[in-house]
Image: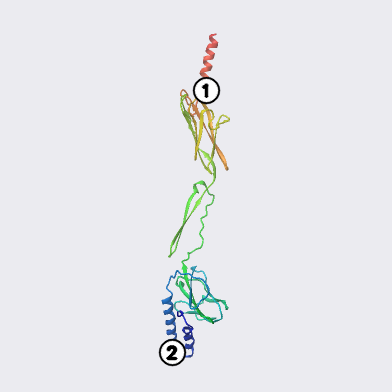
Amino acid sequence: MKPLFSWDDFSCFKKQKIMSVSGHFLIFFKCTALLSLKIIIFVPPGLPVRSQGVFQSDKYFRDNTTVKQGETVFLKCAQEGIVTHRAWLNRSSILYAGDEKWSVDPRVNLVTLTQEEFTIKIENVDMTDEGPYVCAVQTNREPTTNIVHVIVQGGLATDDEYLQIPSITRNRAGTYECTAVNEIDTDVKTVDITVNYAPTVYDGRDIGVTLGQRGVLECEADAVPGADFEWYKDDRRFINGFDGMEIVNTGSLSKLTFFNVSYGDYGNYSCVAVNKLGSSNTSFVMYGPRAVQDGNGSTLGVQLDTCLGSIVSLFFLFKI
């Protein structure tokens, strides 16, 4: 198989330097056209091929490298054997022939030139720099061609963007979305913000229940992390399943259920919501059907029953 480039292709550039101006231009044009034609034919743009291995005769080595717009790309060409000639080219011109710079672009510079490595760099890469680059090497063994396809990703106006939330409150919790857009593509990222706070218990609602019926007290709390609930009657804490009652906690809601309300179940109850940041509580009253409430909403049923009992006792006392 004939190599992609022979060193005669590059030698023609050298010959032009001793000729007249018109001859200089003509030969330069022919040489550039020849090399460019070979690159265009054998190195299609967007080449997605990658291969690695030892150097073989007339072997093509193909690779891709990705760089962001504005960064520096390094084009590395590894070599084996005794190198006699080498050059880096792009589609339109020779960049470097050995240590001699042919490119007029100040962004292109030689980095390493040894028997083992031939590396150049292109600084402040632009979208127009995207495409195939060819390293042609002639050794005492055989010619070798290394092809590197440079892929340039569009850069953003700024690398980082920050959202600052001073004095964060629970109302700021939620999902935030950041969208980055340029002429190449759009990317979207989301960030979930969780705000931890102590429980807040909503006001309890008193209930009236007939003896023998089912009664339910409901306690709701807003808290992050979620609250644990405790139920009390006076100073006595309820244990789930004790004395014909049940406690069911579902998320932010706790229910205390009496399946067969007795006279002893009437009275004052309290619910306490607790998490690692604090606690909050509210109170309830469960009363019988004869109970009435004062203007402030407090229940007087138990007190009225007590008064009636005292009046009856006094009546019999005076009668005696």
- Check residue 174 in the rendering and tell me which mark sits there, or answer none: none
Q: How crowded is mark 1: few (under 14 residues within 10 Å), some or many (20 or more)?
A: few
- Name the amino acid type tagged 1: Gln
Residue 278 percent coordinates (x, y)? 57, 41
Q: Nearer the viewer, residue 216 or 39?
A: 39
Residue 143 percent coordinates (x, y)? 50, 80
- Check residue 303 in the rendering and tell me which mark sits there, or answer none: 1
Distance (Cα) linking label 1 and label 2: 122 Å
> SS for tag 2?
helix
**Closer to us: mark 1 or mark 2?**
2
- Name the amino acid type tagged 2: Gly
Q: Is residue 224 above or below residue 259?
A: below
Q: In this view, does 14 lie above or below 245?
A: below
* Quadrant showing the N terminus: bottom left
Q: Residue 233 appears in which quarter of the rendering?
A: top right
Q: Specify the farthest residue to the top.
A: 320
Mark 1–mark 2 CB contact (< 8 Å): no
Residue 81 percent coordinates (x, y)? 56, 79
Number of numbered callouts drawn: 2
Residue 4 percent coordinates (x, y)? 45, 79
Q: Which of marks 1 and 2 is nearer the N terminus?
A: 2
Q: Which of 173 and 259 is in front in this view?
A: 259
Q: Residue at x 42, y 84 (%)?
A: 30
* Quadrant showing the C terminus: top right
Q: Residues within 10 Å of mark 2 (few under 14, many from 20)?
A: few
Q: Is residue 241 above or below residue 36?
A: above
- Judging from the image, the colouring scheme is rainbow
Q: Residue at x 47, y 51 (%)?
A: 175
> SS for tag 1?
helix
- Check residue 23 in the rendering and tell me which mark sits there, or answer none: 2
